[in-house]
Amino acid sequence: FGSRGIEVKIKAIEFCRKKKIPYLGLCLGMQLAVVEFARNVCRLKKANSTEFTTRLGRVDNVIDVMPEQKILLKEKRYGGTMRLGAYKCELKPGSKSWKAYGKVKYIFERHRHRYELNNEFREILEKRGMVMSGINPERDLVEIIELPNHPFFVATQFHPEYKSRPLNPHQLFREFIRACIKK
């Protein structure tokens, strides 16, 4: 997408957040939703992702690679730097995601990505209103974020499209469409 394309996506996410337009972000869509929220709600004006900041000065990388992946990248061992496959996610009771999944405690969803929400910024994001509604319990990684005072603002680190079928849509797609119809 290039840095210009990313900045336009961040502006579109801001528009959805401010105008209360339903938003469902997947993978990069979650990462950029976190960047947008960090910049415009948490006032971290230099919030960004490591993926896009290699030649910039001091930034707050709210999205980053995991520490063990940094070692592999430094050694130019790129093959082991992605989080692939199904991972366990614990849902926060009462959240939109928890309701969408039928009020279950755990789900398993498939991943294909390199970058994660940087846990160093979780506290400030939560204090300003972002809900971490899905957490991988083994690694304490954020899997789902939500904004509670919004008709539907949900974003996932994983790829729900891997489990969705035309006549059996994934729960999050179904709820997103439902919110769009209401809007």
Image: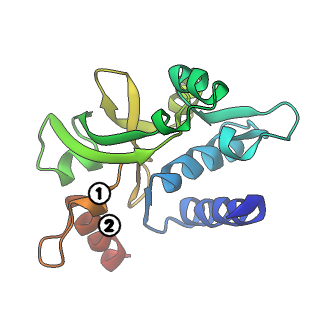
Q: Amino acid at mark 2?
A: Phe
Snapshot quadrant of residue 38? top right
Secondary structure at badge 2 equals: helix
Q: Please indicate whether residue 2 sits to the left or right of residue 181 in the image.
A: right
Q: Residue at x 53, y 39 (%)?
A: 115
Q: Residue at x 11, y 40 (%)?
A: 104
What residue sits 53% from the left and 26% below the top?
69
Dot 2 or dot 1: first in sequence order is: 1
What residue is shown at x 71% (from left), y 43% (from top)?
39
**Few, some or many C-alpha atoms within 10 Å of disc 1 (few <14, some 14-19, many ≥20)?**
some
Quadrant of the drawing holding the N terminus = bottom right
Q: Mark 2 sits on what residue?
A: 176
Residue 99: assigned label: none
Q: Quadrant of residue 171?
A: bottom left
- Which amino acid lies under the numbered mark 1 shown in the image of this protein? Pro
- Residue 49 in percent (x, y) is at 66, 41
Residue under label 1, please give it.
Answer: 160
The one nearer the camera, 170 or 1, is: 1
Residue 66 visible to the viewer:
yes
x and y percent of residue 176 in the render?
32, 66
Q: Could one spot residue 148 in this view of the protein?
A: no
Q: Is residue 74 left or right of residue 81?
A: right
> Where is residue 15 drawn, in percent x and y?
62, 66
Quarter of the image with the C terminus in it: bottom left
Kindly give the residue lying farthest to the right in the view shown.
57
> Residue 111 placed where, x, y %?
35, 46
